[in-house]
Amino acid sequence: MSIVIENLHQSLIINPYIEGKRKLRILSGYASPTFVHHILYALENIEIELIIGMIKYDPITIWEHNEYIKMADSTKRLEVKYYMGDKPIHSKVLYWEANGILDEPLAFIGSANFTRNGFVNYQETMASVEPAEALTAFPIENLLSFKTSSIEELINFTYQVRHTTSIDTSAVAQVVRKTKPCVDLLLTTVDNPRKIHTTGGLNWGQRPGRERNQAYIPVSKKLHNANPGFFPKNKEEFTLLTDDGENFVCVMAQENNKAIETCHDNSILGKYFRNRLGVPLGEFVTIKHLDDYGRNYVTVYKINDETYFMDFS
């Protein structure tokens, strides 16, 4: 047995993948869809089977469930199961399957939930163990697939519109407006709120050779300085919920973290704003469009380090 207390992300996930491992089985009391998202898209051939052990005792949010479904559908490399036994599982186990007859499986147990906090931000301890022994920790009964028909009627996800997979945005908004810190982000230029970016912000794609819906939400250096630590670090994914029930996996990007972008396809955010503003897809967004809508900024609330709520109502 060897103990790992530093660089868990590199040692337990990246290094085995580099060495040829491809199928990762995970048992974790809690998990984060944004961390799963990061692993799935950073390691393009990895396959993940995740069992979340505490969901009956402490249900996940409906948007987390929806994000697992989205990732599974888009990558075909994710399977999630919810443990529904009487005694919740708080264990944390990683099991890398052997990749071929000349390879050996690899397993770790310890304190790290399968989240960014567990593998990057917090001090956690994991230990290598005999793979066959680690397998015995994985439950084989009382497991509910995340793609079970009508699962929304079987699990009462947090912030769920009853018996649907929709987000109860009014409940989210009521909580965040009372209890969570927020910032206002202009969709216009900082120096002149009556002037819109011509090749940046909502009009980032309005250049030759670009997808014309590409967009980002500007975050000024002045705002970062006034609110240190409000947003994640550069290139760190997070979930952005919206007041009309959408949710996106986004990332802080560009020099000085000056932009909030949607991951993998930064036209998603541009299409979203054009639809809300009533602007045809691909067209230039003008200050008149914002005036007609009645708002030239968004308010972003920080729910936690990986989840934000955007109000553009």
Image (tube, rainbow, N blue to C red):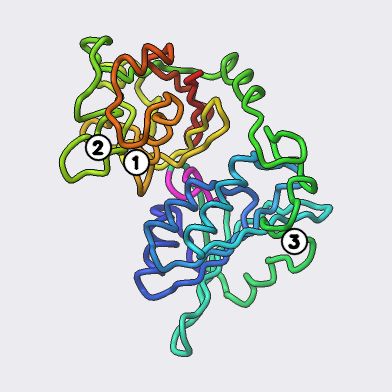
Q: For the residues marked 1 and 3, what is the alpha-carbon distance in whole angstroms?
A: 37 Å
Could you say which disc has been placed on residue 205 in the image? Answer: 2
| Residue occupying the far right of the picture | 86
Q: Which residues are magenta?
A: 112-120
In the structure shown, which secondary structural element does the residue marked by tag 2 occupy? loop
The tag earlier along the polypeptide, 3 or 2, is 3
| Residue occupying the far front of the picture | 280
In the structure shown, which secondary structural element does the residue marked by tag 3 occupy? strand
In the structure shown, which secondary structural element does the residue marked by tag 1 occupy? helix
Compared with 100, 35 (above or below) is above
Residue at label 1? 267
Which residue type carries mark 2? Answer: Gly
Nearest to the eye among marks 3 and 2: give it: 2
In-front residue for pair 68/24: 68
Contact (Cβ within 8 Å) of mark 1 with mark 3: no
Contact (Cβ within 8 Å) of mark 1 with mark 2: yes
Image coordinates of residue 140 in percent, x first then y, are: 74, 69
Residue at point 62%, 27% (across, down): 169
Residue at label 3? 143
